Amino acid sequence: MTTRTRRRVVERTMFALTGAATAVTLGILFFLLGYVAWQGAAAVSLDFFTHLPAPVGERGGGMANALVGSAKLLALAAAMGIPIGFLGGVYLAEYGGRLAWLVRYAADALNGVPSIVVGITVYALVVVPMGHFSTLAGGIALGLMTIPVTLRTTEEFLRLVPADLRDGALALGAPRWVTIVRVVIPAGARGIAAGILLALARVAGETAPLLFTAFSNRYWSPGVRQPTASLPVMIFTYAIAPYDDWHRQAWAAALVLLAVVLGANLLARAALGRGRPA
Amino acid sequence: MVVARRSTPPVPPATRPLAPPLLRVGARRRWRLGDPAFRALAAGFALSVVGIALLIAVVLFRRSAAARQAFGWAFLWTSTWDPVFLRFGALPFVYGTVVTSALALALAVPFGLGAAVCLAELLPRSVADPLAFLIELLVAVPSVVYGLVGIFVLVPVMRTLTAPVAAALGWIPLFAGPTYGVGLATAGVVLAVMIVPFIVAVSREVLLAVPQAQRDAALALGATRWETLRHVVLPYARSGIAGSVVLALARALGETMAVTMVIGNRPEISASLFAPAHTMAAVLANEFTEATGDLYLAALIEIGLVLFGITLVVNALARLLIPPEAARP
């Protein structure tokens, strides 16, 4: 074999291998989505959305309480995490004082903290003083986890707003803060909203921080001071339980959760136009 | 998630006048006060992020005090985990975390790097961009869903696949039976699937950021495209690619749900990859709510503290390695 053919063969082989790696990775994705859709579609029913979990040993029932629980947890997380992340991002992009590096560093650190560790912290700070698990504690844990993504995307998108717009508003006599609130933020609003959606989609599937904050509940959980069921924790509990009927319910819940999370990701991407997903 | 590709930014719907041409005196004074007030408000929220990060560290440190005093540094290298006699050593969990993460990297790096090269260097952008988006969607899949598929699909498959391996190579401690399906190897595979998208996404960005002139120069000298990649592009992108791997490692170290569902949750150190084991994150998920007694709880929180410290260092390392233009929040 001449050197030239050998070099060509090496090139073909190596590039074929990278193609194979791509194919395998994509294959895993399609298998995963397809399998959850297949198992979930067979298990999901109207009862799943409208009924409470059936008593142990009985067939049927649903996860209506977990759906409501997850929605409440997300609402609390948004109420807590988004103001901090959003205004923090505004500060970094528009003022960025001497402490900006410290805020960025803290946000990065917070982003990297394993979710189970966030759970422990909220357990110590909220659950122990209250004396019991609660929706509130779970919402705080998820809220903490929305901060880094909200903060960094807010900063990114405000930085994309051209300086001309700021200058124009300032030249018209608007104070700095009116310029920010009425001109700069509306200009970046679409991207910021997409970032917030991604942050919420990310925590919607979190299980670990809820295990010892929101805990779980087989009944409705009125208010925010009682333990609550949530979709991810129910999937976990049902998956490791020894009952076939519970496994079916877990697949149904996984399908619903996956549809919501991936739907939010696609929506955010659509809002960003040619942008990229998280 | 950086979206800095838009050429024409949206114009705000600021059609109403920003301020009336002549302000009443009182209004103007109020607006002058508005600036420092708004700045202070934004700064307060921004600094609260620093406060939260510090708070996590302080809480973990203080709440683990009892365990740190009782066991000292030996906590990290003793392997007895006995809640009944209150003797706690975290080595089995550290071992499980290290081995599963190493396995995950060994499996994920070739695939992730291969896919990144294919999507950055070979395929045209019109094909590569949608494929990259699909792979990045894997990041969004909740870990409990990976765990669910792991339990019902991967564990039976691993049971079938590992039994003949253990039968043939069982004399090597690494592959000794019995094979349950759950264990270190299964957890490593699940983690590998979970971290591949990180490696693909970041490495691809890093490769796309390599200047075209570098490639052109090598090709002009007669190098094949593979040689160009191997000897010019990859060395140029080396630091960023290493960063993507470190970032993926950070995810693997802290991953909880998917691992605890397939690893078998047994606090033992076994030489075999097929043996059930435990990780630091998994033991927290399993035992935290059942932990009775202050020392038991403090020991678990100390594991959380160690995990926190490790991921902090690993994430900082990734940030140093990944060039800012390829980083994403």
Image (cartoon, coloured by chain):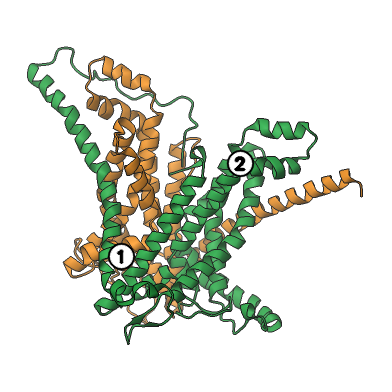
Chain colours: A orange, B green
Q: CA distance from mark 1 to mark 2?
A: 38 Å
Element carrying mark 2:
helix
Compared across the picture, whether B301 is left or right of B106 comes to: left
User: Is residue B204 positioned above or below B280 on the image?
Assistant: above
Query: Residue B22: where, in percent of width, then height?
Result: 14, 12
Query: Residue B293: where, in percent of width, then height?
Result: 25, 79
Q: Mark 2 — on which chain does it sit? A: B
Q: Amino acid at mark 2?
A: Leu
The answer to whether residue A3 is seen in the rendering is yes
Q: Nearer the viewer, residue A134 or A180?
A: A180
Compared across the picture, whether A154 is left or right of A7 comes to: left
Q: Looking at the rendering, which quadrant does residue B91 occupy?
A: bottom left
Check the image and name the residue furthest to the left: B26
Q: What residue did someone put label 1 on? A: A120
Query: Residue A70: where, in percent of width, then height?
Result: 32, 59
Quick check: do tags 1 and 2 share a chain?
no
Q: Nearer the viewer, residue A246 or B142?
A: B142
Q: What residue did someone put label 2 on? A: B207
Q: Looking at the rendering, which quadrant does residue A104 occupy?
A: top left
Which residue is painted at 32% across and 86% down in the image?
B84
Q: Residues within 10 Å of mark 1 (few under 14, many from 20)?
A: many
Tell me, for residue B182, which label it has, or none. Answer: none
> Number of marks in the image?
2
Q: Mark 1 — on which chain does it sit? A: A
